[in-house]
Structures are given as structure tokens and as C-alpha cells.
Image (cartoon, rainbow, N blue to C red):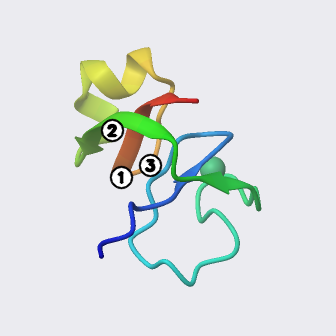
Amino acid sequence: MVLKEQACKKCGYVLEDPNTTDCPICQNKKFTTFWKGSVVITDPENSEVAKKLNITQKGRFALRIN
Ligand SMILES: [Zn+2]
């Protein structure tokens, strides 16, 4: 069984390491596996998507968090 990755409830960051307890982006400690869609930001300064979502860090982010 594959567990769905956890996403930060605050900023949507998708955790690469399931043992992480603090969001590396916003230090939030609440995560959820109930999220839909994700976007990978590799160049936040030049990405229109990153600007729209107010993402300033590289990484994978959930688009919708339930
Ligand atoms: Zn976060």
C-alpha cells in the first residue's frame, strides 16, 4: 500500500520525506493527505504559477487542500 504524500495545510508544500514534522517553507506542523493536484516549482522567481500562488521557494506544492 502506498501512502499518499503529505502536504502542508498552510502553504501546500508536498513533503518529500514523510518523517518531516515541520514544513521547511513555513514551519507549520499540520499536514494533510487530502489534497488534489500538484505543481512543481523549479524557478520561483521566473514562474508565473509561483507568483499566482505566492510561492517563493522551490518544491512541489498542492493546488487544492481539503
Ligand atoms: Zn508550509
> Relative to the observer, which residue lies in front, 25 or 9?
9
> Relative to the observer, which residue lies in front, 33 or 16?
33
Give me the residue at 40% from left, 21% from top.
Answer: 51
Give the Cα distance between marks 2 and 3: 6 Å
Kindly state the secondary structure of the residue where label 2 is placed: helix
Label 3 near label 2: C-beta < 8 Å? yes
Amino acid bearing label 3? Gln
Outermost bottom residue: 19
Label 1 near label 2: C-beta < 8 Å? yes
Label 1 near label 3: C-beta < 8 Å? yes
Q: Is residue 37 above or below residue 9?
A: above
> Relative to the observer, which residue lies in front, 61 or 66?
66
Q: Which residue is mark 1?
A: 58
Q: Is residue 52 above or below residue 66?
A: above
Q: Which residue is mark 3?
A: 57
Kindly state the secondary structure of the residue where label 1 is placed: loop
Give me the residue at 49% from left, 50% from top.
Answer: 13
Callout 1: 10 Å neighbours few (<14), some, many (20+)?
Answer: some
Is residue 61 found left or right of 25 in the rendered image? left
Callout 2: 10 Å neighbours few (<14), some, many (20+)?
Answer: some
Give me the residue at 66% from left, 43% from top.
Answer: 9
Amino acid bearing label 2? Pro
Q: Which residue is mark 2?
A: 44
**Distance from mark 3 CB to nearest ligand 1 atom below 8 Å:** no
